[in-house]
Image (cartoon, helix red, strand yellow):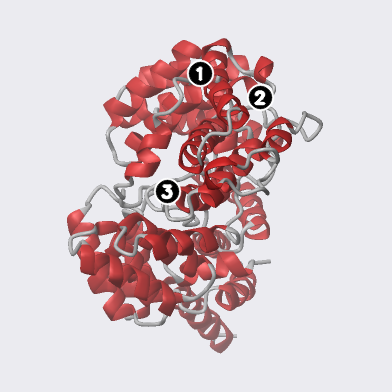
């Protein structure tokens, strides 16, 4: 079943599998990169700061502040323990000394950001809320709280904080972009368009704002206007290949199948990168494997492969067994044309974690490109065994099986993809093509009718269905 969020993403021209959650950043795998697997402090830890905060009354400090769970620093890697511990000690000292509100706000905010980066989630959010309470005119704290909720996957909670930050700093473009993205996520394209236009009035050459406005117009059923904005965004940020999918959707709705197909072939996962000084400062807080991974991912999304690879290597120097970083390093090397280096990293990741599905899939792709089809097939099948819902692996396996002359087996995979994610239009199209190859036109007709219920506006499906119906009509006339 297609969820409301997924349907909204498709309506806005966002490729399935690439939901827009934060401008210029893809945080889907942020939890996979935890250094050593450490997590937020559990609720059982002492609520030390809350007890101390209640006794502070000097310098205009509110009597009621949020209790902050004391972080279990022993669970941190040695490289982080001193850094986080020092910030925590500064906070507790200022609380105990009854520091003025402005100083205490800064101490809470600084501690909250570092705890946020180290993924002590409950402690971080309490610190940032206290910073906002103590310094209500400082737009940084509500902005970081909004970003914090995005990092936790709590999209519904984030907009209220971004609205508070916007009220304090109405001309801040990163805040406007975040509000626009939030309204798109909520299915409010007109409100989203208004925010993106505000951003463009401040920064007329903002590719992220044009990209957002184009998707908002597409969701408002204005494909021609959307295409104009998206083409401008692409001209400003040609490396942002995610724009191609939205353009394909726009031209498809305009009836321009040729241009739609051309953009669809060039689609990718890189969105226009937005300058965000506050988040840049946050990303650089920790000298940890996680921080290096985040920096590398930012460079990767912008197509700066060498810079990304260097950041990933720095992260691996701190944590050689971090399979998420090793896989992304392999992917960056592959983008640079260093296939042998990429294979080494994927295989190293699998020695550490044999069930790492992304490495299995990536290794399969490389093996298939080298003509080692049986070896590639085994990697794709292993990825699917470990993660049955891994749509990319199923699609790759299906394409490979077709090339190996095994259409029946390929059809099984296309059907599985449609069961897992009916938005994947390529699975519908290839499933129909396999049936046509097998001379099963009645099955193809039924399949395409179901496909067009899910994708009523896809021209390729309509054209394929017309061909199938024409062949069946000719065959009936010859009986």
Q: Nearer the viewer, mark 3 or mark 2?
A: 3
The quadrant of the rendering that contains the N terminus is bottom right
Q: Residue at x 36, y 65 (%)?
A: 246
From the top left corner, tell me how far across and down residue 70 is, in percent.
Answer: 69, 28
| Earlier-in-chain disc, 1 versus 3 | 1
Above or below: residue 248 compared with residue 24: below
Left or right? Give the position of 23 relative to 55: left
| Residue 15 visible here | no
Q: Which residue is mark 3?
A: 140
From the top left corner, tell me how far across and down residue 316 is, in percent.
Answer: 46, 16
Q: Residue at x 35, y 60 (%)?
A: 169
| Earlier-in-chain disc, 1 versus 2 | 2
Q: Which residue is mark 1?
A: 83
Residue furthest to the front: 58
Badge 2 element:
loop
Q: CA distance from mark 1 to mark 2?
A: 16 Å
| Residue 234 visible here | yes
């Amino acid at each position: 079943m297609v969820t409301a969020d997924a349907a909204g993403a498709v309506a806005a021209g966002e490729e399935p599998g690439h939901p827009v959650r934060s401008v210029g950043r893809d945080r889907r795998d942020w939890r996979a990169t935890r250094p050593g697997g450490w997590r937020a402090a559990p609720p059982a830890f002492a609520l030390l700061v809350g007890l101390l905060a209640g006794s502070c009354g000097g310098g205009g400090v509110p009597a009621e502040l949020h209790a902050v769970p004391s972080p279990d620093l022993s669970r941190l890697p040695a490289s982080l323990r001193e850094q986080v511990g020092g910030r925590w000690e500064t906070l507790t000292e200022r609380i105990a000394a009854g520091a003025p509100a402005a100083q205490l706000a800064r101490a809470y905010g600084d501690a909250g950001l570092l705890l946020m980066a180290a993924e002590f989630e409950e402690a971080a959010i309490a610190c940032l809320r206290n910073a906002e309470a103590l310094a209500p005119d400082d737009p940084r704290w509500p902005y970081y709280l909004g970003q914090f909720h995005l990092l936790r996957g709590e999209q519904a909670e984030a907009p209220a904080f971004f609205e508070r930050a916007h009220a304090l700093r109405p001309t801040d473009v990163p805040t406007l972009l975040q509000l626009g993205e939030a309204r798109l996520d909520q299915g409010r394209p007109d409100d989203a368009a208004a925010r993106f236009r505000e951003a463009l009035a401040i920064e007329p050459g903002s590719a992220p704002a044009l990209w957002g406005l184009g998707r908002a117009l597409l969701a408002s059923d204005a494909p021609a206007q959307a295409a104009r904005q998206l083409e401008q965004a692409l001209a400003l940020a040609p490396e942002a290949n995610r724009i191609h999918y939205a353009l394909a959707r726009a031209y498809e709705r305009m009836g321009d199948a040729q241009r739609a197909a051309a953009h669809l072939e060039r689609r990718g996962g890189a969105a226009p990168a937005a300058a965000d000084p506050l988040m840049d400062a946050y990303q650089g807080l920790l000298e940890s494997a996680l921080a290096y991974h985040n920096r590398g991912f930012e460079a990767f999304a912008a197509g700066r492969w060498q810079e990304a690879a260097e950041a990933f290597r720095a992260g691996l120097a701190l944590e050689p067994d971090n399979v998420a970083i090793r896989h992304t390093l392999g992917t960056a090397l592959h983008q640079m044309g260093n296939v042998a280096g990429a294979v080494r990293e994927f295989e190293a990741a699998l020695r550490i974690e044999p069930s790492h599905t992304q490495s299995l899939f990536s290794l399969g792709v490389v093996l298939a490109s080298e003509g080692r089809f049986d070896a590639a097939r085994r990697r794709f099948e292993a990825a699917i065994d470990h993660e049955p819902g891994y749509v990319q692996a199923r699609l790759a396996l299906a394409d490979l099986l077709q090339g190996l002359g095994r259409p029946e087996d390929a059809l099984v995979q296309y059907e599985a993809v449609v069961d897992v994610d009916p938005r994947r239009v390529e699975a519908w199209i290839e499933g129909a093509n396999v049936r046509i190859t097998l001379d099963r036109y009645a099955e193809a007709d039924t399949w395409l009718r179901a496909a067009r219920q899910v994708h009523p506006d896809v021209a390729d499906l309509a054209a394929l269905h017309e061909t199938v119906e024409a062949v069946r009509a000719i065959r009936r006339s010859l009986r």
